[in-house]
Image: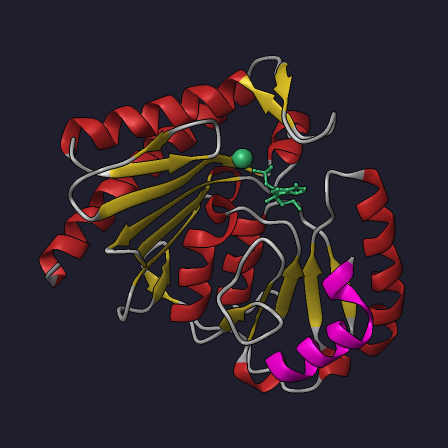
Amino acid sequence: MDLDGTDNLLALAVQLASDAADLLLEGLTRDRVVVTTKTTGTDMVTEIDQASERLIVDGILLARPDDGILGEEGTDRVGTSGVRWVIDPIDGTTNYLYGHPGFAVSIAVEIDGIISVGVVNDPLHGEVFTATIGGGSFRNGKPITASTQSNLANALVGTGFSYEAERRRRQAEVLGKVIPHIRDIRRMGAASVDLCSVACGRIDAYWERGLQPWDHAAGALIATEAGAIVGNLDGGEPEFDFCLAGPPALFAALRDLLAASGAAGA
Ligand code: 2AM
Ligand code: CA
């Protein structure tokens, strides 16, 4: 697809994320109710998660009826155009349920299997992060870059915990081994925003296990285009087993520390 095609996809993704973000803000003015749970009792879904996904999916299909779509709340549509949308209608649902800052609408677009557009809209902070492959990363239209920190001891590192209790316990053990070797830890609660935080240098690095494609697809492109490395522990792409993001000067040292701390099995 030519540059125009990518730009058109970006414009549509920005518009749909903005419409969904308005829906999220409107939902904050009313009581929020858990309508169902998924993997565990703490993996919650509100009616706003479902309404936001419906809004985004309807908008995509209206403009581009031949595209594929993968969405957290159940959309799994095979397309014929070579374009597939990967969406999280609310990333950071626990924060959203509590009205706590740290949730976002995340929309990525794959072209022929390659993530080529990423948009993360964090409505409470009024921040829209965007990236196109090879085109750099932006926050509200201004270019952003990842941190230049090279000393692990001075690195502020984000992470997240599983919805599953026993896994959370193991992850807390890993944290106990990692935290003496870094500046401090942040746990915000929305993977897409954490990856954007790496992209703009307001944390130095981030890792988490157990992420789904819709959690990291857009944020990983935004972090990568901002100069960070995003991958698993073995030099591969970010995946369910591991997502680590950080600037080149920190990535290897943090990866080694995490591996030595047993993060891969936690
Ligand atoms: P969600 O809010 O869309 O569920 C929290 O650490 C971050 O990880 C959130 O981005 C959350 O997305 C995501 N996440 C996805 N699957 C998860 C899981 N099984 N356990 C915990 N967090 C998960
Ligand atoms: Ca979600």
- Residue 235 included in the magenta stretch of the image: no
In the drawing, does residue 118 fall left or right of residue 62? right
Q: How is the image coloured?
A: secondary structure
Compared with 214, 178 (above or below) is: below
| Residue 237 in the image, given as x and y percentages of width and height | 48, 66
**Which residue is drawn at the image coordinates 58% and 53% (left, top)?**
240
The image shows residue 37 at horizontal and vertical percentages of 65, 22
**In which quadrant of this rendering is ligand 2 seen?**
top right
Left or right for 123, reference 70: right
Which quadrant of the structure image shows residue 6?
bottom left
Q: How many marks?
A: 0
Name the quadrant containing residue 221. Answer: bottom left
Q: Which residues are magenta?
A: 251-265
Residue ID at (72%, 52%): 187
As drawn, is 114 to the left or to the right of 154?
left
Residue in view at x 62 percent, y 13 percent: 31
User: In the rendered view of the protein, which quadrant contains the N terminus?
Assistant: bottom left
Q: Nearer the viewer, residue 10 or 177?
A: 177
Residue 186 point in image, percent of width and height: 73, 58
Q: Does 197 sit above or below residue 40? A: below
Q: Which of 125 and 113 lies nearest the eye of the viewer?
A: 113
- Relative to the observer, which residue lies in front, 19 or 251? 251
Task: Residue 29: name its quadrant.
Answer: top right
Q: Give yes or no for residue 255 being in the magenta stretch.
A: yes
The quarter in which the C terminus is drawn is bottom right
Q: Residue at x 70, y 69 (%)?
A: 156
Instruction: State the image coordinates of residue 207 (x, y, percent, origin top left).
Output: 65, 62
Question: Can you say whether 208 is above or below 90 in the image?
Answer: below
The prevailing secondary structure element of the residues shown in magenta is helix
